[in-house]
Image (spheres, rainbow, N blue to C red):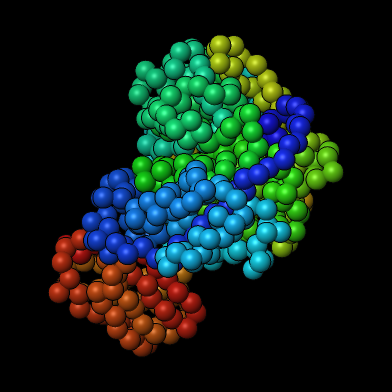
Amino acid sequence: MKKLLVLFFISFSFTMFAQEDAWVYFNGKPQAQNFIDNPLTMLTQRALDRRITQSIAIDILDVPIDENYILQVQNAIGITVEAKSKWLNALHIRGSVSNINALTALPFVSSVAFADRSLNTGGKLHTPKQVSQQKVMETATIFPYGNSANQIEMLSGNVLHEQNFTGAGKIIAVIDAGFPGVNTSQPFARLRNNNLILGGYDYVNRNANFYSGHAHGTMVLSTMGGYVPNQLVGTAPDASYYLFITEDSNNETPLEESLWVEAVEEADRLGVDIVNTSLGYFDYDNPSYNYTYEELDGVTSFASRGADFAYAKGMIVVVSAGNSALTNNPYISVPADAEHVLTIGSVTSDGNYSSFSSIGYTSDGRVKPDVAAQGTAAVLAMPDGSIATASGTSFSSPIIAGLVASLWQAYPDYTNGQIMQLIKESASQYTNPDEELGYGIPDFDLALTNGPLSVTSSILGSSRVFPNPLSETLTVASTHDAELKYIEVYTIFGQSVYKSSLSGTTRTINLSTLSAGIYIYKIESSKGFSTGKIQKK
C-alpha cells in the first residue's frame, strides 16, 4: 500500500497487462442550461450556500456528464467504464489500445488520454486550472487531551478549542482505504451519539458499507474526531464527517485517482467544507503508469487536476505529503503537487523534521509541502478501540485538517483561500520556506488573532460597496486612490444582470430593477479587481 501514507512496507509482483487504463474526454454538455437553471437537481442547498458565501457562481463544471455519452461509451466494443468525473467531463475506462483509440470517432469525444503516457500521441494532457473568486468568544472548553496533547498544542490548537472552536458546523470528508470499527468502538462513540457521521460510500466495491476495508481510514479519522478522555482528543471533535473509500488496498492502479475525484465531486455536491486525504500516488503495479518527478507539476495527474477543481468550488483539500524521503524518489506524490491543496509534511514531537516526510519542491518550483504537523508517533485509535501511536504524514494531514475546520468555524464568512493563507502566514518559517517543511509549523492561535486584519484587507481589494443589503442604489468606492473602470453583477448561477462603466473614485448605481436575492459583483479599477456578494432587499 504505497499510497497509504503511513509507514507500512510490502512488496509487489508485476504481471503483464493486456488492458490499458485511460480517460475519455467529452467536448460538451448538451443539457447544461437545464441543470444550471435548476441547480438543486445537481447540488444540495448546503453546497449552494457555500458558493454564495464565497461568491462562486454555478457553472458548467457542476453539470453532470451527459448520460447518452456514458451509454454510448459503455456500449462500445471492448470498453469497460470504471469511474466518471463531471468536473473533467471524462470517464475512466479500460480496454485495448485499439478499442480505446476507436472512441475518438464518436462525435462528442474530444480526446482520449492513456495512463501510460507513452501511448499518448499528443503528449501530456493539460486541463486549465480553475480558481475561486473571491466572534464572539464563549466559555472556555478544556479538553482532557492526555497523550494527544502534544500534537494539538504544538499547533496552538488548544487555544481554538478553549474558545469553543472545535469544528462545529463544518463538514469534513475523509477519503481513505476503509473505516472498520468506527461504527462500534468507543473512541468514535461521541461522533455516533451526536449524529456527526453523516454517511459515506465505498467506491471500490460500489456499495454503501463504508465501515469496512483497511483500518488506515479509521486511524486517520481518530486524529480529528476521536474522543477518549485523558488519552485521545481529535482536533475537530465536533465537526461532522462523511467517510469515503476510494483506495483499493490490494491493487495500485490509476483507477484509484479517478475514484478519488469522483468522491471529491460527491463531497462538493453534499456541501462538504474540507477534504482530508492521506493517500498519494507515484508508482503503480504497472510501471508504465508511474509518474516522474517532472510530472509533479500540479496539472499532469488526473487527481491533482480534480483537487484544484475542488478548490474552485470553495472547499479546502488537505493532503499528506508522503513518506518517501528515504527512497530513490524522495518527493511528494499526487495530488499533493496540486497548486491549491494544503500539503502537509511531518515533524517529530519536538518539532523537528521527520526523516521520512516527502520533500518538495514541485517540478515547476512551487513550495511544497505547505506546512507540517506531528506525524512521528502520532496518537490515534485503532479499530478495536485501543489507543496507539503510529508514524506517517497520514496523521499529520488530518491533525491539520481538523484545525482547519475549527479555524473556519471562527471565521465562517471567509473564503477557502483566505483561510489557507491565514494558516500559511502563521507558520514558523513563512518568510523562509524550505523543501522539508514548506512554510513550517502553523500557529493557529496566531491565525485566529491575525484573521480580522489580514482577511479584511483581502476582502476590500481595490474597491468596496455599500449599503449591503441594499434597497435600490449601491455606492461603489475605490480604495488606495484607484480609478474605477466598470462593475458587473451576476446571479449566483453566473448570469450577468447588470453592467456599467464607472469613472472617478466613487459612483452610485441604480439596481432597483433587480429582484430580491443574493448577487455576485465584479469591479475593475486601475489597481485590480474586487469581487464579492451583495443582497438586494
Q: Is residue 147 left or right of residue 178?
A: right
Of 272 and 487, the residue lying toward us: 272
Q: Which residue does the image show at 34% across and 55% down from the upper left? A: 68
Does residue 396 appear anywhere in the picture?
no
User: If the image is split into quadrants, where does the N terminus sit?
Assistant: top right
Of 295 and 519, the residue lying toward us: 295
Picture coordinates of residue 151, whole percent (x, y): 64, 29
Q: In which quarter of the image is residue 6?
A: top right
Q: Which residue does the image show at 48% across and 46% down from the upper left? A: 81
Of 35 and 356, the residue lying toward us: 35
Q: Which residue does the image show at 49% across and 26% down from the upper left? A: 225
Picture coordinates of residue 271, whole percent (x, y): 37, 44
Q: Is residue 100 left or right of residue 191?
A: right
* Residue 125, placed above or below residue 23: below
Q: Quadrant of residue 247?
A: top right
Picture coordinates of residue 283, whole percent (x, y): 72, 43
User: If the image is split into quadrants, where does the C terminus sit?
Assistant: bottom left
